Image (cartoon, rainbow, N blue to C red):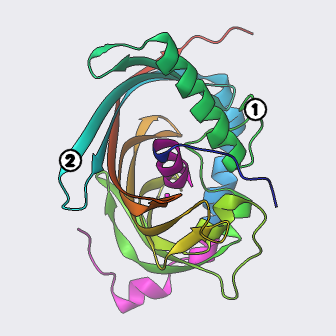
Amino acid sequence: MQSLVPIGKRTFIWSISLMLSGFGPSLLHAQSLPTADDLIRKAVARAQDCQERCGRTGYTYTKVSVIEELDSAGKVKERKEKVYQVSLQDGASSVRLIEVNGRPAQGAELKKQNENDGSFRQLLGESKNGKGSNRDNFLTPELVARYDFKLLRQTHANARAAHDIACQPKHPEPPVQRVSDRLLNRISGTIWLDAEEFEVAKAQLQLGSEVDFLGGVLGSLKKLAFTVTRTRVADGLWLNSVLSGDFEGRKLLDSMRIKMNSRTSNFKPLSISG
């Protein structure tokens, strides 16, 4: 198991958050539907292929993130809004903090952002330079191997035909090799998979039971409700566009309740030489 890393409240929540109307088909149509496992296999293959395809065309976009820390009564005691410039190139994403609460980011804030990014990558078991790691691609073979999937119905997401798929952790629980695995073993939810391109159009995730970290010494998480909506910005290229989360738990001895919301906009292609 990898060594634990010291992280702040917000990095703790962001790391967790990295680690996610329709119509019912007739019985005759349901019999012709593919299985959930078939659909997920296609989605994983698509995601892996995208690492090569997306590397040929880079994109840049703006992300606005709002994090609110609440007190025991549910009132906001601290609110921070950050603006980032994100670049996606060669299958890897880089994030640059440019504004905090309406003013340009200062040196100390930039340093803290770099430290938080390092903690994020170590928590997820990524390399320090983040190469080959597109955080918007979360359907990896390692991840889907931890879950059972069930096709619920055909529906629509983002005005496109989609498959509504439920996911549950396998039983018995898959082995824990890094910190995030403990969390993944308790998360379930629903995935809306685009019927044409087999990309995740939307996902809603929740925590089934409380999770302790380092036997509760490092902290615990007792509530997680997380939603991600993805946008098709180009042929075959989908990126996270809206994320929202509600988290409640404990960091060391301090209780915490945090709500977060982020939105991306201004998607623009990058010219990539070579």
Asked which quadrant contains residue 81, the reply is top left
Q: Residue at x 36, y 17 (%)?
A: 99
Location of residue 248 in the rendering, given as x and y in whole percent from the top left corner: 38, 63
Q: Residue at x 57, y 55 (%)?
A: 19
Asked which quadrant contains residue 74, the reply is bottom left
Residue of label 1: 128
Observer-nearest of 207 and 156: 207
Image quadrant holding the N terminus, namely bottom right
In the picture shown, does residue 90 fall above or below 43?
above
Observer-nearest of 170 and 89: 170
Q: Residue at x 25, y 61 (%)?
A: 72
Query: What mark, if any, has residue 207 been given in the picture?
Result: none
Left or right of 131 on screen, residue 38? left
The magenta segment is 10-39
Q: Is residue 194 visible?
A: no
What residue occupies the far bottom of the structure in this picture? 27
Secondary element at image label 2? strand
Residue of label 2: 76
In the picture shown, does residue 164 fall above or below 247?
below
Location of residue 151 in the rendering, given as x and y in whole percent from the top left corner: 48, 79
Query: How many marks can you see?
Result: 2
